[in-house]
Amino acid sequence: IELNNNSLEKIKIKLLNINNQKDYYNSLTNEWTAENKILSKNFNKYTNYEVDEIFNNKNLLFEEKMMLSDFITYLTDDILCKVDRASMHNSIESRSPFLDHKVVERSWEFPLSSKISNNIGKVILREILDDFVPKQLLSNTKSGFGLPIDELLRTTLKPFVEDMILSSHKSENLINMGKFKNLWDMHKSRKKNLGEKLWPIIVFKQWSQNNL
C-alpha cells in the first residue's frame, strides 16, 4: 500500500490521540480532534452517550462495538440519508432488505468469526453468493458514495466558500476562522488536499447561518 505525505500525516496525528478503543473508533469516524483547535471552544464534554455505553459494555468484542456504533450513527445519519435523498430525487422507491429487523436480530446471534475472517467481511453472504455470482465480482473493491470534494471546492463550489468566508455571522464565535482560512488557502492553492476536513466546517457554518 502506497501512502502519500498527507495520508501519513493524518495517520500520525490520529495515532498520537488514541488512548483506548473509543478513541480509535472516533479516529476512523471524525476528521477533526480537539487538538486541531478548529473550534473556538472545547466541546469534548458533548458526546454520544449511546456510543459511550457501547464501548463500556464488557460483553461485546471490540469489532462488535464498532459495528453497533456504526449501526446507530453512521448507517442512519450518513449512508441511509444519502440513499434516501438520491433515490427520492430520482423518483425511486429504494428498500434495504438486510435491515429487516428479523435479519438484524438473527445476525447478532452469529459469532464474529462467521462475519469476519482473515480480514474479509460479510463471510456468510459471500458463501451464499458463491453459488450464484462470479468470484471476481465478490472480490471487487467496495465502492461508496464519495464525491470528488477536493476538486469541487476548488472549482464549482469555490465562489460559495469564498462568499461564506467573507460573510459575518455569530457562528464565527464557535469556529476558529483564522485556522480555517489558512487551511482553505492551502487547499485551493493545491499545497494539500483538505476537502474532507474543510467540508464539515463549511456545512456547519452554512447550517448555522440559516438556523442560529
Image: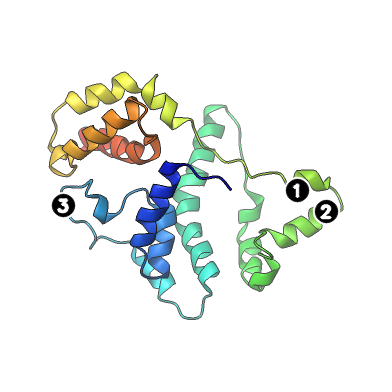
Say whether residue 140 is visible.
yes
**Quadrant including the C terminus:** top left
Badge 2 vs badge 1, beta-carbon distance below 8 Å: yes
Q: Which mark is residue 138?
A: 1
Q: Quadrant of residue 55?
A: bottom left
Residue 153 in the image, given as x and y percentages of width and height: 37, 26
Looking at numbered disc 3 in the image, what kind of residue is underneath it? Lys
Q: Is residue 81 left or right of residue 42?
A: right
Looking at numbered disc 1 in the image, what kind of residue is underneath it? Leu
Q: Residue at x 25, y 55 (%)?
A: 34
Q: How far apart, in angstroms, are the residues tagged by discs 2 and 1?
A: 8 Å
Residue 192 or 103: which is nearer the viewer? Answer: 192
Q: How far apart, in angstroms, are the residues tagged by discs 3 and 1?
A: 46 Å
* SS of the residue under disc 2: loop
Report crowding for label 3: few under 14, some 14 to 19, many 20 or more residues within 10 A (C-alpha): few
Say whether residue 212 is visible.
no
Badge 3 vs badge 1, beta-carbon distance below 8 Å: no
Q: Residue at x 39, y 19 (%)?
A: 155
Residue 36 in the image, given as x and y percentages of width and height: 26, 50
Q: Which residue is mark 2?
A: 130
**On screen, residue 210 above or below 66:** above
Q: Residue at x 53, y 74 (%)?
A: 61
Q: Which residue is mark 3?
A: 41
Q: Quadrant of residue 43?
A: bottom left
